[in-house]
Image: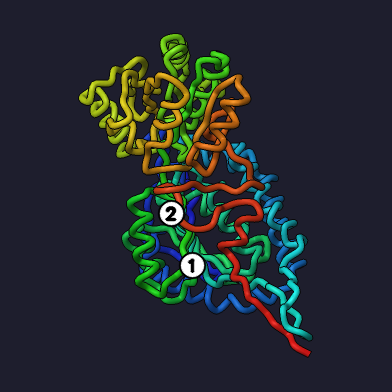
Amino acid sequence: MSVPYHRNLVDGEWVDGERRPNLNPARPGEVVSEYAVADRDTARAAVDAARRAGPGWAKLPVGDRMRMLDRIGATILDRADDLATLLAREEGKLLAEARGEVVRAGQTFRYYAHQLLQPTGEVYASTRPNVHAEVRRRPLGVVGIITPWNYPLAIPAWKVAPALAYGNTVVLKPAELVPASAGELARIIADAGVPPGVFNLVVGAGSVVGEELLTSDGLQGISFTGGTRTGAHVAQRCIAHGNKRFQLEMGGKNPLVICDDADLDVAVRCALDGSFFSTGQRCTASSRLIVTAGIHDRFVAALAEATQALRVGDPLDPDSQLGPVVSAGQLDQNLDYVRIGRDEGAAVAAGGTHDGQFMRPTLLVGAHNDMRVAREEIFGPVSCVIRAENLDEAIELANDTDYGLSAGIVTTSLSAAERFKRDARAGIVTVNLPTAGTELHLPFGGTGASNHGPREQGGYARDFYSVPVTCYTGW
């Protein structure tokens, strides 16, 4: 049976390359689609096309850009069911989660379509007589967008939509593990009437296509989501090659603090969701469960029981609660960390096993904050429990990390909640909610090794994708 074939999109043309299979992680022998691999020449042509298309796109009336973005969003929403099935098959996300991601992607394009009608610019009183002072904004220019595999539609959407809305042209390089979702997004954008060269898609290895984008003099900015080590490389390359503006959203080692006064059911529910849903493959996942002494034993027992009861299975099966790990390599990394945790002295209270690429959610207990499993991002269904004597120590442990993306607390105390919101060193703070789960109209980003550059999403996205210009007019 034939499968879909996704090509690269350059200057409005579909461009071939070496043809490779895109495999289903739930059934590794099943080919979901095929895709064309881009090389350096293809990436270079995409940058050139985006550069040529830039002036015309930036001058296009706002109403025209708005209609195109709204059309893209509407098409994504109209195709929610088939896009969700495709996403679930190529990435392994549960069908319900995949559909939620597709809906969010569609809503994101529609949100930025309507953001174009919001007031822009600022007017100031000048200190000089007969001078008018104002700040306008112009597009950044050509933007390279490098996205990961764990949200193959939502993350490209929340980068591409504001980039286009604010008048930039785009070269998107998605992860090779999820070429079909990016390929369908490219088709939708092209069919919406976006002019040739304004949006370009190049699928290929980071060492080839990614390097071409990072070292190109034709780009003015790079927006990257991925690992911290790769993010540091992106920063170095951007500075060395044209001093490009760069935005880095990287890893997390997110704490969820469980206080003595917490509602036990709420605590277990937040920990299960934050630690294990989406197979733990979220940068905002709760990978450190910091539990105060008075509730520690009850919480561990209840969470271990709930973890063991989770149903791991095919993402298209409505009874499944967790799908497969995205790749064999990621599975090996997850299992290595379980072994490392045991070697460091932690015990496995639930999980630790796998059947093919289906890994049981794994709870490590008796961990300490200086262990590797408590300090390094795992990016899988593995979480560790760390005991704290009281809230003071819990907050100290929560902040003892190189990262600072998301942090949560479960408590019935308003005082503890307010203190945590004040003192937690993270860009996202939750109270009685999982650490994972954000909204498209609010800023997203962290501190420390989790982030560099302006926040993503909401109105804050404008800060990266546009340049303020101060204008003085005398008369």
Q: Is residue 4 above or below residue 162?
A: above
Q: Is residue 441 above or below residue 341?
A: below
Where is residue 213, by image quadrant?
A: bottom left
Pick the residue in front: 207 or 272.
272
Viewed as shown, does residue 331 lie left or right of 88? left
Q: Is residue 258 above or below residue 209?
A: above
Tell me the mark number nearer the camera, choosing from 2 and 1: 1
Viewed as shown, does residue 444 lie left or right of 22? right
Q: Residues within 10 Å of mark 2 (few under 14, many from 20)?
A: many
Pick the residue in front: 225 or 180.
225
Q: Residue at x 63, y 42 (%)?
A: 439
Q: Secondary structure at mark 2?
A: strand
Residue 404 percent location from the top left of the image? 45, 42
Q: Which residue sits furthest bottom?
A: 475
Tell me which amino acid carries mark 1.
Gly
Q: Is residue 8 visible?
A: no
Q: Which residue is mark 2?
A: 35
Residue 376 percent location from the top left of the image? 32, 38
Cα distance, mark 2 to mark 1?
26 Å
Q: Residue at x 44, y 46 (%)?
A: 149
Q: Which mark is residue 47?
A: none
Q: Residues within 10 Å of mark 1 (few under 14, many from 20)?
A: many
Residue 269 percent location from the top left of the image? 54, 20
Q: Which residue is mark 1?
A: 221
Tell me which amino acid carries mark 2.
Tyr
Pick the residue in front: 142 or 304.
304
Q: Is residue 25 visible?
A: yes
Q: Secondary structure at mark 1?
A: strand
Which mark is first along the chain, 1 or 2?
2
What scheme was used to colour the molecule?
rainbow
